[in-house]
């Protein structure tokens, strides 16, 4: 295997030569995921700061060992990291990479993620699941084996299923009906979170979501986990459905396991499309993001600016309503071209409603202004009936 060296964060890593990033490479390494790894370093640092003891981390899908190495070098208060991978070539290169960086508190083991999880019950404060495609077959053993108070970090790259391009795989893997809408990436994260919450619930565990994002071709969630029957029951009250009208874009959020929705849109009479079950609780914690913004400043990260940009966007939208509108889609239903988004946002703000942009979509607006009023406002801004020009 021909290799070369790359530098990321505080480590230097040997990676296989590749023409294009592929799961078929002898050992997988994707430079695009540097941002993802930078974010993980910030989240784990911030999480560690909330504890009064050192942590044990499991990087279950190690690849070149880059995550494990970075966690060891770049996170304060790490007792030990276990890196696992089923690929013997990955294990060899990961071990070499630990030596290359003089890292002595990382063990690398060739084994299946589920096996390593099951044989280390209650040992891990942090479990990182970064597989090819869906994490669905690893979430139950993660739920069983994470320590109470621990942090789970889970990636999914099967966004075509979670976002509703393909229905059947989403139903098969997550037991949920997806929906291809302008806010389908948010739906995807909510479907993934509901699935994780149900896996945890089987073990009388529940989660508090610290951060989640959808970037490039993947989604990633970070949540702390606690144990307790009653609180788990309570946490499941965050699960429900979204009914969406494809005609006028009206939507309704419904809590509970059976969608007790009328199946007709009250605004236009069209039949609703219903998606879920989804996590309708918070998908990030505003205070935690604020702390992470501060922590990011203390770290050496190549992608620092991109990390901060994402954190700031997520901070802004953290306490907004569920789902967002796309200004172009709204204008299509109005048969007008879009006015300037900043002007629309300004007017919504003037009327005293919640309004934020969203990291999910450049043209997305998160607001609690009723849809009919929002459409009227957009038309008025377009006709310059409102704002500074009048
Ligand atoms: C997406 S890559 C991991 C990338 C790595 N976390 C990084 O940031 O560079 C997935 C890795 O999981 C390994 N893998 C696949 N199935 C596995 C399983 N069941 N248990 C453990 N490792 C597995 C693959 O060999 C591959 O190295
Ligand atoms: Zn409608």
Image: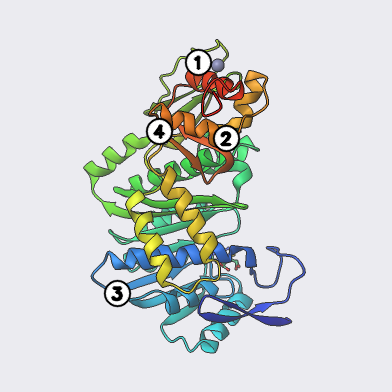
Give the residue number, with chain letter if any, for mark 1.
263
Say which of marks 4 and 2 sits in front. 2
Q: Residue at x 42, y 52 (%)?
A: 211
Q: CA distance from mark 1 to mark 2?
A: 32 Å
Q: Which mark is residue 354?
A: 4
User: Could you tell which of marks 3 and 1 lies nearer the N-terminus?
Assistant: 3
Residue 289 shows in this picture: yes
Other residues around mark 3 within 10 Å, as few (<14) / some (14–19) / many (≥20):
some
Query: Which quadrant would residue 378 be assigned to in this image?
Result: top right
Relative to 41, does residue 109 appear above or below in the rendering? below
Q: Residue at x 23, y 70 (%)?
A: 52
User: Could you tell which of marks 4 and 3 lies nearer the N-terminus?
Assistant: 3
Q: Helix, strand or loop at disc 4? A: loop
Q: Helix, strand or loop at disc 3? A: loop
User: Could you tell which of marks 4 and 2 lies nearer the N-terminus?
Assistant: 2
Q: Which mark is residue 59?
A: none
Could you tell me if the residues under marks 1 and 4 are in contact, i.e. CB atoms within 8 Å? no
Say which of marks 3 and 2 sits in front. 2
Q: CA distance from mark 1 to mark 4?
A: 28 Å
Q: Residue at x 31, y 62 (%)?
A: 147
User: Could you tell which of marks 1 and 2 lies nearer the N-terminus?
Assistant: 1
Say which of marks 1 and 2 sits in front. 2
Q: Residue at x 50, y 15 (%)?
A: 263
- Provide residue 260's location: percent of width, then percent of height: 40, 19
Q: Helix, strand or loop at disc 1? A: loop
User: Could you tell which of marks 3 and 2 lies nearer the N-terminus?
Assistant: 3
Give the residue number, with chain letter if any, for mark 3.
54
């Amino acid at each position: 295997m021909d290799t070369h060296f790359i530098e990321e964060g505080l480590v230097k890593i040997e990676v296989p030569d590749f023409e294009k990033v592929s799961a078929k490479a002898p050992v997988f390494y994707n430079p695009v995921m540097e941002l993802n790894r930078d974010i993980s370093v910030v989240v784990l640092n911030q999480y560690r700061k909330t504890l009064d003891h050192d942590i044990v981390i499991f990087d279950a899908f190690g690849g070149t060992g880059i995550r494990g190495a970075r966690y060891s070098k770049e996170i304060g208060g790490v007792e030990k990291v276990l890196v696992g991978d089923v690929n013997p070539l990955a294990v060899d290169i990961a071990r070499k990479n630990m030596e290359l960086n003089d890292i002595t508190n990382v063990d690398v083991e060739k084994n299946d993620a589920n096996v390593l999880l099951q044989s280390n019950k209650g040992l891990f404060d942090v479990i990182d699941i970064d597989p090819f495609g869906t994490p669905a077959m690893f979430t139950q053993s993660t739920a069983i084996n994470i320590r109470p108070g621990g942090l789970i970090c889970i990636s999914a790259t099967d966004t075509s299923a979670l976002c509703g391009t393909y229905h059947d795989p989403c139903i098969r893997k997550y037991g949920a009906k997806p929906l291809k809408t302008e806010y389908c990436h948010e739906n995807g994260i909510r479907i993934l979170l509901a699935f994780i919450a149900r896996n945890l619930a089987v073990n009388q565990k529940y989660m508090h979501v610290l951060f989640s994002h959808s970037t490039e071709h993947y989604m990633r969630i970070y949540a702390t986990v606690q144990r307790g029957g009653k609180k788990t029951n309570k946490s499941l009250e965050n699960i429900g459905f979204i009914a969406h009208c494809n005609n006028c874009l009206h939507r309704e959020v419904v809590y509970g396991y059976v969608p007790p929705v009328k199946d007709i849109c009250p605004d236009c009479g069209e039949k609703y499309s219903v998606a879920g079950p989804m996590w309708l609780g918070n998908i990030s914690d505003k205070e935690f993001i604020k702390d992470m913004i501060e922590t990011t400043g203390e770290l050496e990260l190549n992608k620092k600016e991109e990390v901060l940009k994402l954190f700031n966007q997520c901070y802004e939208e953290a306490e907004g309503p569920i789902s967002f509108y796309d200004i172009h889609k709204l204008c299509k239903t109005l048969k007008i071209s879009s006015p300037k988004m900043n002007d629309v946002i300004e007017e919504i703000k003037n009327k005293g409603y919640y309004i934020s942009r969203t990291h999910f979509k450049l043209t997305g607006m998160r607001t609690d202004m009723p849809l009919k009023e929002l459409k009227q406002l957009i038309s008025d801004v377009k006709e310059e009936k409102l704002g500074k020009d009048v």
